[in-house]
Structures are given as structure tokens and as C-alpha cells.
Image: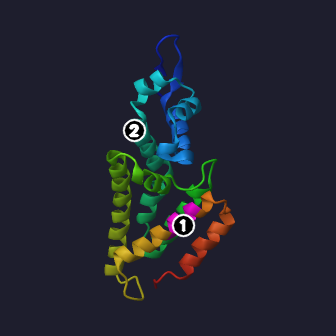
Amino acid sequence: MEKVATRGRPREFDLEDALAAALRVFWQKGYEGASLSDLTEAMGITRPSLYAAFGNKEALFRQALDLYERDKLAYIGEAIAAPTARAVAENLLLGAVDVATQGVARGCMGVIASVACQSVEPSIRDDVNSRTESSKQAMVDRMQRAIDAGEFTAPTEANAITRYLLAIMQGVSVQAQSGATRDELMQVADSAMRSWPSR
């Protein structure tokens, strides 16, 4: 773990711990809602230390997104590697429920970021949209392979079935933010799987 000493009176802090704290703030408040004071207080550092270690607020947000994708969205890559489209869908929905209902910050940061970032500077909006599109395309490609393999009982279009899954995953996130319990969200996932159009 890398330690950083701040200027003036020596003070060390752990970069990963500080970044995790910033992630929680962004997750709870979004990019625009998170002030530098919110961030430095949660991270336990001064503004000069934040700038020295992470750059500006935009750079910190990007690093927080990187951490979120690495720690919280690993389930997406694992789900896409499942042997059938049905297993892919089930793992995606279960992963979405897990991420949306754990810890203090409820919901999905990707959803929060994509909604909250539509009004911010284009560089951040474009970065968030690019990350979202990359995950979506991986899902589309996986569904197309399942279609080509004859896994679906009815005519199915890869983009449409992916959007269906994403809509449920995003709905799980929004409902979690509104206070839905894990059991309630698991019922949503179970209902979706009962109507899944595969053999």
C-alpha cells in the first residue's frame, strides 16, 4: 500500500483507503453533488494533499470510477463468461442486486454517474458514456453468440435482449436507492428469469 506524505507537518495516508472514501462520497452524492470539502473530510486529507496525490476533482472521479469498476463490477466480466445466455443473465441480475444493496451507498454508481453526469463537462460525460458503452457491447456480443448457437426459443435480437437486461439492472439500482430490500430485489430478478426466452 502506497503511503503519501503531505506538505508541512508530515502526515501519511493510504492512497487506496483515501480513494475508497472518495468513491463512497461520489457514490452517495454524484459528481456535482460532491464538494471538495465533502471529499477531503471523508478522505481525511487536506486539499493540497488531494491535489498532490490525485490531481483535481475530475481526475479523482475518474480514479474512483476505475476502483468501482475493478472492485464492484467484476461480476459483469464473470457473468459474461458463463456457459449459457441464461446463466449470463442470472449472474448479471444477482450481481446487480448484490452491488445495489451492499454497504452505506446503495444503488449503482454507474447509473448514478451516467444520470448525474449528463449536465457536467463533456470530458467526464464522454468518459462515463464510453465506460457504459463498453460493458453494453460486451453483453451484446455475448448474446449474439448465444443466438448463433440456437439458445433462444423465439426470434431474439442481441441489442434488444441486452437493453432488457440493462433496464432491469438499472431498475434494481434505482429501487435500491429508494429503499427496496434485497429480498424484494431478488423477487425482481427471479421474475425476470422466469420470463427468460431460452431453452
Residue in front for this viewpoint, 32 or 55: 32
197 is higher (above) or lower (below) than 142:
below
Residue lying at 50% horizontally and 54% vertically, measured from the top left: 112
Residue in front for this viewpoint, 182 or 105: 105
Q: Is residue 177 magenta?
A: no
Q: Quadrant of residue 198?
A: bottom left
Query: Which residue is tagged 2?
Result: 58
Residue in front for this viewpoint, 44 or 80: 44
Element marked by disc 1: helix
117 is higher (above) or lower (below) than 36:
below
Q: Quadrant of residue 38?
A: top right
Left or right of 157: which side holds 108?
A: right
Residue 69 place in picture, x, y as percent: 44, 50
Left or right of 22: which side holds 130?
A: left
Query: Which residue is tagged 1?
Result: 171
Dominant secondary structure of the magenta stretch? helix
Q: How is the image coloured?
A: rainbow
What are the residue bounds of the magenta stretch?
Answer: 168-174
- Asked if the residue under mark 2 is in contact with the one under mark 1, i.e. CB atoms within 8 Å, the reply is no
Q: Is residue 173 magenta?
A: yes
